[in-house]
Each structure stands twice: as C-alpha cells, then as structure tokens.
Amino acid sequence: MKQPETHTREIVKFILAHVSLHPKDITTFTAANFGLTRQAILKHLNRLIEENLLIVKGKTKDRTYVLKLIAEYSQEFFSVGLEEDKIWREEVRPLLPDVPPNVLTICEYGLTEMINNVIDHSEGSKVCVELKYDLDKIQLRVTDNGVGIFKKIQSKFGLDDLRHAILELSKGKLTTDPEHHTGEGVFFTSRMFDFFGILSNSLFFAHNTDGNDWLLETDTSRRDETGTMIVMEVSPYSTRTVQSVFNAYANATGDFGFSKTHIPVALAKYGDENLVSRSQAKRLLARVDRFEKIDFDFKGVETIGQAFADEVFRVFQRQNPQIHLHPINANEQVQGMISRAINQQVS
C-alpha cells in the first residue's frame, strides 16, 4: 500500500531530525518508531541521498548516514583592527540566506559578541571563525590564541582556582574591562543558543537549553596552554528570539535590565568536595548583590551543610532583604537544610 503523503513527510522529518544522533542505526531506529520494516525506511533514505540531503559512507554493516552540509566556512584573521560586524555582514551572513530572521539575529549577536571579546580581552593576535550549517543545526566557532578566558578572569579577580572563574562567568555581569563592557555578552549568548561551550586552559564549560551546565577537566597538565574556543549551536527551526532571552532576565516591572540570574551551585565545588562551609557559600555569593532575583540551581548537588545553607539563606538574606533567593532542583536533604535556615531567619 502506498503511504499517505503526510506520513511520508513525518518519516522524512524524523530521519533528518535524528540522523546526527543515530548515524549508524537510523534505519532501525526510524523503523521501530513508525512500526515499519527496514526496507520501507531504506526507500526514504535513498530518496534523501538522491536529493542530496544525506550522504552515505561505507557499505553494508559499516554504512553511516550524515546530513549534507548546506554551508561551511573557516577563516583566520589578525585581531588588530578587526571589525566583528564586518565579519558577520560580509563573510558569514551571506552563507545563511534562507535562515529565519530570529535565528539570524541570534547568530549575529553571538558571533559578534564573541569576536569582540577576542579583540578586547584575549590578548591574542589571531582569531579563527568557523561555520557549519546543515538541516539540523547551525554551528559557529570562534577560536583565539590568547591567554585563555578562564586564566584571564582568574588573574584579574585574584581567584584561587580556574574553576572559580567559571562560577563567576556563569553568574553574568562579569568583565575584566568594566569601562568598556557590561559583562553580559557571554551570559546572554549562552542562553540564546541551544548549546554553548567554552574550551580553555584544560577546562570545558557548557550550557544547553535544558538548563544543564557541566564542567569537565580535559587534562590538568594542559592548564598552562593558551587560547580559547567558543562553540555555539542553534537549530534553524528554533522559535527563540534575542528579545525573549533579554526579557527572561528583566526586572519585575518589565523594564529592560539584567536583574535576574541563574547560578549552577555545583560550580562552587572543587572536585568531589561537599558544600559545607561558610567560605564556600561566600564564594557562591560573590557579586550576586548586583541582581534582584537569583535562581540557585542545585542540580547535581547531593548534600549541603548547615553552615553553607545558613550563610546563603539566613545571613546573606538578612543583609540583603531586597534580593529574592529562589532555590530550584534541590533534593530532599538540600531542601531540608535550606528550610531550616529560612525558618531561623523568620523566627
């Protein structure tokens, strides 16, 4: 029986949406999802290959399917005298002719902000700008040969550990040049893209639209290596807008401003230590008095100590009653400690 056209479109859309995650088993994966045979799915795959939307590599059991690149770009520039808007307007924007306006604006904001950071902060001489665009995502990369973003922040603010630099960066409103920058670029860019990652000084920090933040240490022996790579990915079909991200962090009256922040509490830990001390709490609380509302995200934190909870939710809150502290993703133990501290505050 011939499949209805609407069903065919659903199958094709499913294949294109999942082939990046299932390059070797997309046939079986799609067949199971729609209750069809592998032979039926192969017909759709072959049609996508004929239409130059998919590329197949290998034969039989080693066969792999990948999305055909719509556009690819890589160019290195000298940082001195570089104009970020010109790179966007003359080099990258022409490669994205059919991308919706909201996604284009996200790409423009992210790329120009990250190139400008290289020019003004990296102390490097070169920057490499890269684009990979297929039906699934637009990926932008900005790589420099500077001192490294985490090391620059650590040195500027006298921080004890490189990982402490990531905690500060995640809060927002952090800049090593307050005369010329607000410190909002990295924070807002990381919220606009589906995926945002920074690789520098042996550390990899990433944020995605699921609200997940994670920190990986690639090799401690490489901490003295220089340079920074920024990776930004967004779906061409994203409905997110630059303005919606700005609005999410505006104040309660709706006036434009950066009055809210979201802080992954797990970044306040070093290694496998537990969050038990007041000094750890003060590390978490550094500079947060610049915001009106703070979401403390306890995802990945299994336990906190009484002193840590007391410092954040009683001592700091008593000293800053105008700031609204909002713990989220806290397990039973963590929530119990927070509630105890809050109850002592009001008693």
Image: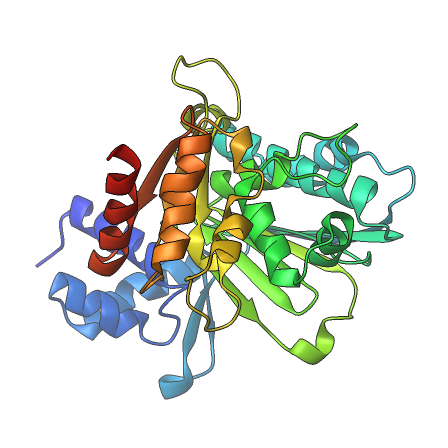
Rendered residue at 51%/72% (across/down) = 271
Depth order, front residue of 309/41 = 309
Query: In the rendered view, does 193 fall on the left or right side of 201?
Result: left
Left or right side of 125 for 8: left
The residue under the point 54% across, 36% down is: 188
Position in image of residue 319 (x %, y %): 46, 31
* Residue farthest left in this picture: 1
Give the number of marks.
0
Between 58 and 179, the residue placed more toward the observer is: 179
On the rendered image, what quadrant is the N terminus found in? bottom left
x then y, percent, for residue 253: 40, 12
**Frontmost residue, 294 versus 51:** 294
> Considering only vertical position in the picture, is 26 above or below 328?
below
> Which percent across, then down, holds residue 187?
56, 40
Q: Is residue 262 visible?
A: yes
State which quarter of the image contains the C terminus: top left
* Residue at the extreme front: 347
- Which of the two residues, 326 or 202, is positioned nearer the viewer here? 326
Q: Left or right: 287 with respect to 83?
A: left
State how the image is colored.
rainbow
Percent x, y of residue 265: 43, 53
Q: Give the residue displayed 74% in from the left and 58% down from the top.
A: 151
Residue 136 can be seen in this image: no
Q: Is residue 238 above or below residue 35?
A: above
Residue 181, quarter of picture = top right
